Image (cartoon, rainbow, N blue to C red):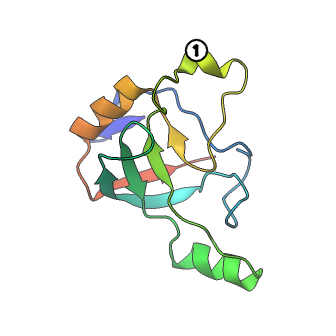
Amino acid sequence: MLFQNGYVVKTYQVCLGRNPVGHKMREGDNRTPEGTYILDFRNPKSTFHLSLHISYPDREDSLRARQSGFSPGGGIMIHGFPDGFTMDDLGKQRDWTKGCIAVSNADIEEIWQLVPDGTPIEILP
């Protein structure tokens, strides 16, 4: 959901990591992080159709992963689909990313225009 001044202005269908239950604990777990982060930069030349970077991992995420002997990973984005790929291609497999949040190409174009760098994002279970 996209909020402005405390009100929902738009709701989007999303695809999460292939292992969508639970907070991202380490690189390669195919989970999407949960918590409060910042959309801190954008990549117009992404492998996927546009992408907005999520500030994962934070200090807590890094500490938790390293205490378990793992890298926390990174490169978590909100992005569109690869060229030629649509929501219709997913069938029943709705969660397919390696931990990112994917939306349709039309949706990421809209989000790209509406949401400036520095915007907080809250990812809830």
Q: Is residue 112 left or right of residue 25?
A: left
Q: Residue at x 55, y 48 (%)?
A: 100
> Which residue in the structure is indicated by mark 1?
88
Tell me if residue 8 can be seen: no
Q: Residue at x 70, y 65 (%)?
A: 25
Q: Position of residue 11 (x, y in %)?
A: 42, 27
Picture quarter with the N terminus = top left
Q: Residue at x 69, y 67 (%)?
A: 26
Q: Quadrant of residue 9?
A: top left
Decide: is 35 above or below 83: below
SS type, badge 1: helix
Q: Position of residue 116 (x, y in %)?
A: 23, 49
**Tally of numbered tags:** 1
Decide: is 93 above or below 48: above
Q: Position of residue 90 (x, y in %)?
A: 64, 22
Q: Position of residue 37 (x, y in %)?
A: 44, 61
Q: Is residue 124 left or right of residue 27?
A: left
